[in-house]
Image: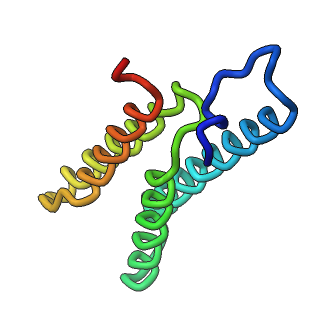
Amino acid sequence: MNASAAAPLNAHTSTDELVSSLRARRDYQAAYAKWLHAAANLADESTGGDEIFDQLCSAEEDAASQFLAMRPPLRWLIWRKFELLEHVLAKEDRAGVRDREREMQALAAIRADLLYLGFDR
C-alpha cells in the first residue's frame, strides 16, 4: 500500500486516490474479517479431532499474521489490531501458554502503524 492510500480524502482527491483508498480499506477489512472467521471457527467446540483442531489453529495463525502485516488505511482502524492482541492474550492466558511470540508480533505491528499514521506527532 502506498502512503497516499492512508492520506485524508478531500475535495482535491483524485479519482485514482479515492479508488486506491477504497481498495486499501476493503482489503484491510477483508483481512480482519478473515481473522475473525478463523478465530470463530477455532472457538467452535463442535469441531472434532486433533487434526481438525490443528488445521483450525494454523488457519487462525495465518489469518492473524496476514492481518497484522497490513497497514490500516484509516487511522481509527488501528484499533482492530488492538482487538486481535487482546484476543490472543486472553486466549493464551486461559490456555496457560507463556510463549509470547504472537504478542510481540502484534505489538511491533501496532507500534509501526502508530508511527506510520503519525500518532507520534
Residue 117 percent across, percent down from the top left: 47, 29
Q: Residue at x 43, y 25 (%)?
A: 118
> Which residue is rendered at x = 80% and y = 32% of the image?
18
Along the horizontal axis of the image, is 17 left or right of 60? right
Q: Give the image quarter of residue 116.
A: top left
Residue for point 15% across, 62% down: 99
Give the answer, above or below, for where 19 lies relative to 97.
Answer: above
Residue 30, horizontal then vertical, whole percent: 65, 50
User: Does residue 76 sit above or below 58 in this rendering?
Assistant: above
Left or right, residue 78 beside residue 16: left
Query: In the picture, residue 7 is in which quadrant?
Result: top right
**In the rendered image of this protein, does residue 59 appear above or below residue 12?**
below
Q: x, y (%) of residue 82?
A: 38, 36
The quadrant in which the C terminus is found is top left
* Residue 77 rendering spot, x and y as whole percentages: 53, 32
**How many marks on residues?**
0
